[in-house]
Image: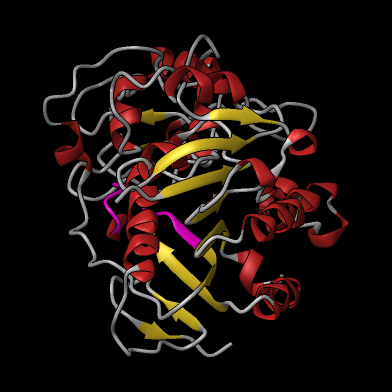
Amino acid sequence: MTYKAVGIHVFAGLFTEGVKEHFEVPAVINDGYGDDIHIANHPEAKLFKSAEFNPGEFNNIDFVYSQPPCAPWSVSGNKKGLDDPRISMTSDAVKIGLSLKPRFFALESVVPAFTKGRAYYDKLGDLWRECGYNVTHMLINGIYSGTPQIRHRYLFIAHQGNLDFPDFTKPKTVNESFIDIKPGGYEICGPGVKKTLDEFGYKGISQGTNLFKWFTRINKNPQYKPNGHMLGRPARSSIRLNGLKPAPVFFGDYSWLHPTEDRPITMNELKALCGLRQDYNLLDEGRAASQVLLGKSVMPKTGAWIAQMALGTINNKTNIIYPEVIDLRNGEFEPLMI
């Protein structure tokens, strides 16, 4: 039996990459950002703009998945919440999702969407309950769903029948992720950081070292910009990876060094840390833009885990009823009282 899924606001298609392990994806609704990359990698999924999409053209959709912008709740968006105009893309995803009448709906965001925006998501939950769905709020960590990054995320789930979530995976280290990966593509390093490394070298940068702290410590004659920032100091997100641990969360234009080699990691290696196949086509977005596209995505392995949960729930025959809020961030089931 073939199960069908539709994606809403899924940008460069990494979420779709994972969903396709369990579902056929005949269509996605995207409004510009990452469209070309999604089309290049998933040509079988017809792409629509929100205003153009007619749900009547698609019957028997089992699963709807979405990753609308998390900026309303994140530091990068200054946590404007409901005052951020991009919140409309979340309500848009719910509206289209309801029109498709899937058996499972999953919307991904950052954890503050739940902790700060709980009242908003409770209202969205009421819309689904009125249509006969159960609603679950789930907190997850990517390292337990196959993604070798510590990515804490929130899932808003509307489902028919009892929830069935997959087994957890063993966390994968950076060293394990780099096995059989050949360096290639853009260096994951901004030009300013690269200039600093060329000048000061790599001495004293052990695995796990934050480059911001390293440079503050070794720079004996600091110079400052008019805004008070130290010239040449890397951003706080700049690190030398620890090969014996999973990678920390990756959001965008970062500078990351290889654990044991005195060089930045490359795009091929970043793809590995995202659980993304090496031949996934990012077109010619450039170094920084490609990094941001990856950082904004639901990683493929986590997307596959969510899709497996959707499929398991659709076919679930058990009588296990879970609480409305579930915390899985520690790799085990924990009820969360908030």
For this view, does 245 lie left or right of residue 150? left
Up-down: is 266 above or below 274? Answer: above
- Quarter of the image where one finds residue 129: bottom right
Spot occupied by residue 19 in the image (x, y as percentages of width and height):
39, 45
Query: Is residue 128 in view from this perspective?
Result: yes
Front-lying residue, 12 or 253: 12
Residue pictured at 39% horizontal, 38% vertical? 239
* Residue in the picture at 51% in, 40% down: 297
Residue 283 lies, in percent from the top left, at 49, 12
Q: Is residue 202 above or below residue 50?
A: above
Query: Who's the residue at 62% across and 71% down the image?
Result: 114
111 to the left or right of 140: right
Q: Position of residue 327 (x, y in %)?
A: 43, 77
Q: Residue furthest top?
A: 284
Left or right: 96, with 285 as reference point: right
Q: Position of residue 48 (x, y in %)?
A: 67, 31
Number of dots carrying numbers: 0
Q: Is residue 17 above or below residue 75?
A: above
Q: Main secondary structure of the magenta part?
A: loop
Quadrant housing the C terminus:
bottom right
Against 176, residue 279 (above or below) is: above
Examine the rendering and report whether any part of residue 204 can be seen: no
Residues in magenta, as a range: 145-153
Residue 57 in which image quadrant:
top right
Residue 21 magenta: no
Residue in view at x 56 percent, y 28 percent: 46
